[in-house]
Image (spheres, grey):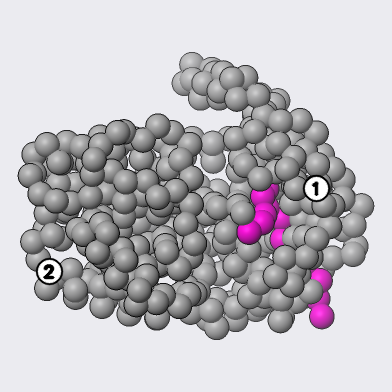
Amino acid sequence: MKRIALINQRYGLEVVGGSEFYTRLIAEHLKEKFEVEILTTKAMDYVSWENKYPADVEEINGITVRRFENDKQRNSQQFGEITQEILNPQFKRTIKDESEWIDAQGPFCPKIVEYIKENKDNYDLFIFVTYLYYTTCRGIREVFDKSVLIPTAHDEPYIYFDIYKDVFKKCKAIVFLTDEEKEFVNKTFQNEEIRNCVTAVGIDMPAVSLEDKEAFKNKYGNYIIYVGRIDVSKGCDDLFKYFVKYKERNKNDLKLLLMGKAVMDIPKHEDIINLGFVSEEDKFAGVLNASALILPSHFESLSISVLEAFQVETPVIVNGKCEVLKGHCRKSNAGLYYENYYEFEGALNYMLEHEDVRSEMGRLGREYVDTYYRWDIVVDKLTNLFNSAIEG
């Protein structure tokens, strides 16, 4: 059995995040096809990168996880100042500047790069998940000829840094999560010749009891739901601003339910309810009973939360400035999108006032997931691409 390593900046049952959760999902579904290991840091949060996990090696759900200490924590103030400077249009940045930015962003983990370099011959393939961080930018350079990149890319300022050109152009293969991501990356890096596939994840739904479903319905009544990290970078500041304005203009009983870790202040409002971190069962029960799932993020390369909503026949309302999210809505006919407050208000009221349409959107969302996001399809595509990259 071929031995592969998946590299991500964080990994663990306690780690909630897009690329991190995605890495765990595909690792656990590929373990019947490959000998899978995880190479990651000892960090639990992405703000400080503080070493929290004590073990160097552990097993999680049948997967060997090798953890490496970060040499230093992120200095948020310093990193903010460096970022502000390097993104200034008047600043003529060099590769050296970009390299210093990568180190400051972190996780600063030379030990993982050293391990990859020293153990190159002990693995058949190295799969780097998400392009942005030190672990990928430094690690992939040691094994370009045995590397697969899963970039989780979207249109943001950092992707245009020169330091990332080799990452996207010299890897052996690329996995794109959506057609929109593939189109954007190929246009940006002119790397159409690199072998690739477009596939994402399958959606696993835990058993949700009737009691769990009824509990949400009875306790919260009419609500929309946001699932994920509560963060400015996820567009939550606009979501709160829009929702508060909506409640001022529309005198109804609608609530906004939040599920996820908050890394920003949440407005004190009687109709904004933060449930924090919840179990998978509670998450699905909450999404199942929502009038819609709301996702205000400008930058998404897939959005598992949207696919999970579709799986339980809940339509979505998303930020139309994100091509990936807009693409999900257009291809599935299971959601609406907005680009300003008044479109947000219109989409929300349309959902609430047209229960028959909302129900049909839910059915179409489930059909979309069943067609494109089944684990057998995903595993076959990844297995074929990885074997092709190994055989060369």
Residue 273 appears left or right of 254:
right
Residue 319 appears left or right of 19:
left
Residue at the image position 42 percent from the left and 64 percent from the top: 282
Residue 289 appears left or right of 88:
left
Magenta segment: does it hold 4? yes
**Is residue 157 visible in the rendered structure shown here?**
yes
> Dot 2 corresponds to which residue?
355
Q: In which quarter of the image is residue 317?
A: bottom left
Of 30 and 148, nearer the camera is 30
The crowd level at tag 1 (other Cα within 10 Å; few <14, some 14-19, many 20+) is few
- Magenta residue span: 1-13
- What secondary structure prevails in the magenta region? loop
Q: Residue 366: image x %, image y %?
A: 33, 77
Q: Residue 387: image x %, image y %?
A: 72, 76
**Is residue 310 visible in the rendered structure shown here?**
no
- Which mark is on residue 190? none
> Dot 1 corresponds to which residue?
54
Of 287 and 86, nearer the camera is 287
Residue at the image position 80 percent from the left and 47 percent from the top: 54
Magenta segment: does it hold 165? no
* SS category of the residue bearing label 1: loop
Residue 62 appears left or right of 344:
right
What's the residue type where badge 2 is placed?
Answer: Glu
Q: Residue 351: image x %, image y %?
A: 15, 60
Q: Is residue 361 above or below residue 338?
A: below
